[in-house]
Image: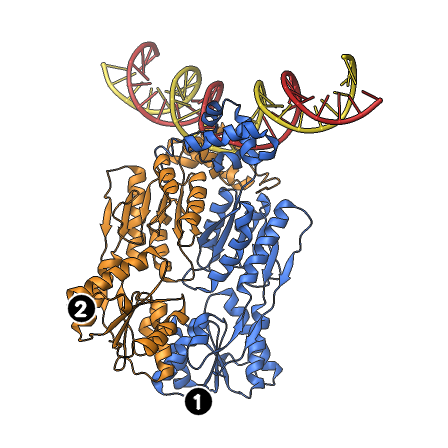
Chain colours: A blue, B orange, C yellow, D red
Amino acid sequence: MPATKGLASSVRMRDVAERAGVSRMTVSRALNKPDSVKPELRQRVFDAVEELGYVHNHLARSLSSSRSNVIGLVLPSLENSIFAQTVKGISDVLRPTGYHLMLAESPDNAEEEEQVISAFVAQRVGGLILHGTEHSPAAVRMLRASHTPVVENGDLPKDPIDMVVSYSNRAASKAMTLHLARLGYSKIVFAGLASNPRAEERQKGFLEALKEVGQSPDMQKIVRVSRGFVGGEEAIAHIAAHLPDTDALFCAGDVLAVGALFDCDRRGWAVPDRLAIASFDDVDLVRHVSPGITSLRLPRYEIGRRSAELLLQRINAKKSSVKKVDLGFEIVQRAST
Amino acid sequence: MPATKGLASSVRMRDVAERAGVSRMTVSRALNKPDSVKPELRQRVFDAVEELGYVHNHLARSLSSSRSNVIGLVLPSLENSIFAQTVKGISDVLRPTGYHLMLAESPDNAEEEEQVISAFVAQRVGGLILHGTEHSPAAVRMLRASHTPVVENGDLPKDPIDMVVSYSNRAASKAMTLHLARLGYSKIVFAGLASNPRAEERQKGFLEALKEVGQSPDMQKIVRVSRGFVGGEEAIAHIAAHLPDTDALFCAGDVLAVGALFDCDRRGWAVPDRLAIASFDDVDLVRHVSPGITSLRLPRYEIGRRSAELLLQRINAKKSSVKKVDLGFEIVQRAST
DNA sequence: AGTTATTAAGTTACCGGTATCAAAAATCGG
DNA sequence: CCGATTTTTGATACCGGTAACTTAATAACT
């Protein structure tokens, strides 16, 4: 039950108008399209704004003009710093445009995401960027019905809501697995989080690669682990207990990989001689541990940048914008493999 | 120049009202205070909402009722996962209340922060949580004039805008330094980021502690380093080059400490025998490296929770809420010292 | 200069809700 | 069963802006 007594009993445009001795409309114009107001009046308006400490009311503006200057972003979690780059990419594009970014956290779960999306639609945001690619039917209906421009980020879905800017989790995972195979590793194990549509794509890519190098796509080679460093430990423990002849571990996440590396360290397992380790995200950490961890460099910043650009383009409808952008990935070979 | 052609040409309350055969007011009431509408009508309204796919317009609601259901949060950066806990704390409190969290990133710099604050005030948010504690005079004036409830988080400022929930950077830093001294280290060096008011408080705490144990508060013992793991490397390099007899390094940040640890590893410096290392934030990472790093456990989650609670309390004005909450800190002793 | 094109400022209506108060319906007491 | 009270619903105005149109002022041109 939200309730705020008196929101800012603040200065209104009308007050500014009176102070400046002009009509409200002139104030509105001076603020939004300064060039359409004569310098003298404009200055009077600005002075009045300054003297009264007027702050524009975006609520009223958006309502009246059916335009919003807010872009919403839905991320699964802030714990993972991989999103920091994406946020930066978006911010860099938005900052000079006058748009603002509104961020919300929502676990990887279509129902909770629906709540968050609904809140954004209720705010009538100008556009939405979603990291998830799996959504409740209701959420999709809502977004379509409201004509909110949407960009999806986390993967390349077959049936996007609107626009997509991403890399392919499956292709990336497959490429890394093939890379490991090419390096001579033949008993590769994949460790990933459960219950995450992107993680599943990564699994598929892993299995596809195995098939491609003539191995049976064996589900036994996939370990489901917990989030965080402990997940890496779990992977190593599993290998030690059940798959001792494994020669390479591919972790679908940077934190997992580092956790695994630390655990190898504790066990006295040489990396990469006893076990090679590769990770899915090239965050700072994986290049600072020793040995540095081979990883997939994903265009996190670029994803943010392009997403924001597409959104703005679409909002301004300058042209029928692109629908799908695959930004690819890159394998960074380091000492861990 | 923000501009959106036709925001959601969506279903309005009026449409729902027609469909349900009632007045707009009844729809509004059915949605906001269901109990005040007879079950039968209420149901008709809900059905109409469902059939038409109506999504409440928060813009109009906030404007009309002078109530907002959005709480703004300003963080210096998302790169650092230390804020994830705080965000979680806030979310946990807000979720069941119907309030939504709107997050914005702003560097540690009063001017840029002012832009962000101004945007929030323009949106007429119901309350604001700021991590920074240094603000431009204009920003403070704006917040005071608009009567926006504000909680500051990053430190315990002497002259808060409104409310404060935090720990004391100075006290924490002093306590850790004394802890190191108590452990027998006598040549302690402090490494921290520049240009950050909280970092300065931490320096002061360090110097105070030195004085307390009878050492001269020597600025030579303070190293200013860059952000990220490299900062830790810089600290070690500085020690190696200029302060070789240092026996303990206190890093004002977890990432710095880990960077330093990694670098010691590369140099073959034993931790803690050659050099002890302590860090300022007890993130997951510092307990997973080996040796585990002694650190300050700060009540990040609790800060978020209490901040949100205070804000809501103040918004609902149930009672003249507390002004200042010091949540303290805790020293976690590990193998690195 | 007189007429027309252009630009600047003002007027009015409305964006999509809610507060407030009045009217209608339901409940109650005697 | 009727008047009084309470509950439920509706009518109207307004929240604080902007769109669209009109009028006033200025510039341009024959």
Q: Quadrant of the N terminus of chain A?
A: top left
Secondary element type, mark 1:
loop
Residue at numbered disc 1: A274
Asked which secondary structure carries label 2, the reply is loop
Q: Is residue B26 left or right of residue B329?
A: right
For disc 2, the neighbor class at 10 Å (few under 14, some 14 to 19, many from 20) is few
- Tell me which amino acid carries mark 2: Gln
Label 1 amino acid?
Arg
Q: How far across and down, in percent of the image, does residue A47 sit?
A: 47, 31
Q: Which mark is residue A244?
A: none
Q: Is residue B278 left or right of residue A302?
A: left
Residue A91 placement (x, y as % from top left): 51, 53
Residue at left 63%, top 45%? A316
Report the Cα–Cα distance between label 2 and label 1. Answer: 49 Å
Q: Is residue B96 left or right of residue A73?
A: left
Q: Can residue B289 be seen in this snapshot? A: no
Label 1: how many Cα within 10 Å (few below 14, some 14–19, many 20+): some
Of residue A286 and residue A96, the one placed in the foreground of this image is A96
Q: Nearer the viewer, mark 2 or mark 1?
A: 2
Residue B48, placed above or below residue A312: above
Residue A313 in the image: above or below residue A303: above
Q: Residue B174: percent from the left, percent from the top? A: 21, 63
The answer for which chain carries disc 2 is B
Q: Nearer the viewer, residue A261 or B108?
A: B108
Q: Chain of mark 1?
A: A
Is residue B117 positioned above or below A192 on the image? Answer: above
Identify residue for label 2. Answer: B215
